Image: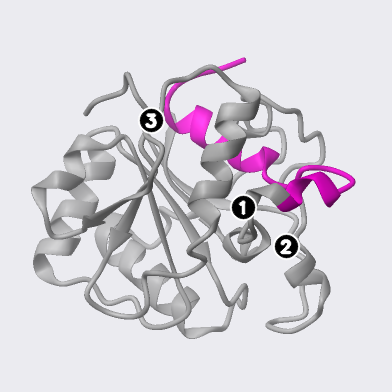
Amino acid sequence: MQRTKFTFARLKYNSGDWDTDQRMPSNLLNSLLEYTTIPLDEEEKIVELSSRDLFKYPFCYLSGHKLVQFSQQEAVNFKTYVHNGGFVFVDDCNHDIDGLFARSFETQMSNLFGPQALKKIPNNHGIYHSFFKFEKGPPTTSFELNGWGDDLVHDYLKAITINNRIGVLYSNKDYGCEWDYDFRNKRFLAEDNTKFGVNIILYAMGINS
């Protein structure tokens, strides 16, 4: 994997809807330019989960609202990628723990890594301090607070950990929708809500502040 330059790689899988929140990647890339000095590609890269191209990128993003049902090759690549040190940030656009995306994705993870592999991570985990400090754990999103979905504000994230490092970070909080706006509108926010995205990326890249 090439770790000298960051590329926002989005995973395209055959089932469900993989191309959600299309402005979010450019927004996070703008934040990396604003807050860090790491070299990066300026555009998002779409990567077929079934392709060997997956293994070029240490960070990948996977999201959707609908069914997640990996093909045999997609499943093999996903598991191999994670075991080889890759990082996948998975965000449920429904932020509904009983929704189709959540149920089907969690089933896929159970099949690939075992029924107990996906676990809550503590709110003092290093990912909450990799750049910006989030003393209370994962920041909430306005979509949770709007009350649709499962009517819960999740005060934790889940992860699959390989060799003491997160390989799969899993969110029901719908960060993708929260960060899906034109980057020029960040100036209207009291606090830049993409800062946690910077933390996730720098953790995935093995870069600490």
The quadrant of the picture occupied by the N terminus is top left
Residue with the mark numbered 1: 157
Nearest the eye: 139 or 152: 139
User: Residue 85, how many percent across, how many down?
Assistant: 29, 32
Nearest the eye: 21 or 78: 21
Secondary-structure class at tag 3: loop
Q: Are marks 1 and 2 in contact (CB under 8 Å)?
A: yes
Q: Residue furthest front?
A: 184
Q: Which residues are magenta?
A: 185-209
Q: Are marks 3 and 1 in contact (CB under 8 Å)?
A: no
Instruction: Determine whether 6 is above or below 154 in the image.
Output: above
Secondary-structure class at tag 1: loop
The image's mark for residue 139 is: none
Secondary-structure class at tag 2: loop
Q: CA distance from mark 1 to mark 2?
A: 8 Å
Mark 2 or mark 3, earlier in chain: 3
Residue with the mark numbered 2: 154
Q: Is residue 3 in view from this perspective?
A: yes
- The crowding category of the residue bearing disc 3, from other C-alpha atoms within 10 Å (few below 14, some 14 to 19, many at least 20), is many
The residue at 31%/68% (across/down) is 108
The residue at 19%/36% (across/down) is 56
- The crowding category of the residue bearing disc 2, from other C-alpha atoms within 10 Å (few below 14, some 14 to 19, many at least 20), is some
Mark 3 or mark 1, earlier in chain: 3
